[in-house]
Amino acid sequence: MGDWSKEPWGNDEAADWFGRYWNGGGIDLVIRDITDFSPESELYDSIRAACMVLECFGSAYAWPVERLEEREDVLRRAIEILENMLSVPSAEWGFLDMWANDPGVIESVRKQIEKLEGYMRV
């Protein structure tokens, strides 16, 4: 896997995910990938990419109105996933190992959590 940044968009896996998003995946892809995420899949960089889109459109004012009833659950699930990536609840969560406990990546994930938590207060 190629990594060129510690940010959610900065690696090959995330670039592939964004390709799927822009080529028809849209909000359905975001919701499905966050809702169905399993740590065994090890698609941590894809989930961070999905969470980045959620950072952009997770506000009640930007979220698609026809999917509004799903918004809060998706935000909660995304926050839970990101938190588990940093506070490993079990051995199957290998995100920190994959990134060798890189402080820059940890900080980037923390920023994502903060942004998403801000939408929960609205």
Image: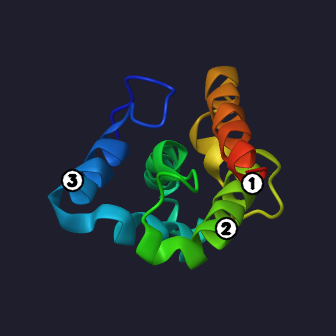
Calculate the distance from the C-alpha at mark 3 to the C-alpha at mark 2: 23 Å
**Three-letter residue code for mark 2:** Glu
Residue 118 x %, y % = 73, 43
Q: Residue at x 26, y 66 (%)?
A: 25
Q: Residue at x 73, y 38 (%)?
A: 114
32 displayed left or right of 24: right
* Circle 1 residue: 120
* Circle 2 residue: 72
Q: Earlier in the sequence, mark 2 or mark 1?
A: 2
Residue 43 x %, y % = 47, 58
28 displayed left or right of 48: left
Which of pointers 3 and 2 indicates the residue nearer the eye? Answer: 2
Label 1 crowd bin: few (<14), some (14–19), many (20+), radius 10 Å: some
Q: Element under label 2? A: helix
Instruction: Please state which of residues 38 and 113 is positioned toward the viewer in this rendering.
Output: 113
**Three-letter residue code for mark 3:** Trp
Q: Is residue 99 positioned above or below 87 on the image?
A: above
Q: Earlier in the sequence, mark 3 or mark 1?
A: 3
Label 2 crowd bin: few (<14), some (14–19), many (20+), radius 10 Å: some
* Circle 3 residue: 22
Instruction: Please state which of residues 39 and 110 is positioned toward the viewer in this rendering.
Output: 110
Q: Is residue 32 positioned above or below 63 on the image?
A: below
**In this orientation, does residue 116 appear?**
yes
**In this orientation, does residue 93 appear?**
no
100 displayed left or right of 57: right
Q: Quadrant of the N terminus?
A: top left
**Three-letter residue code for mark 1:** Met
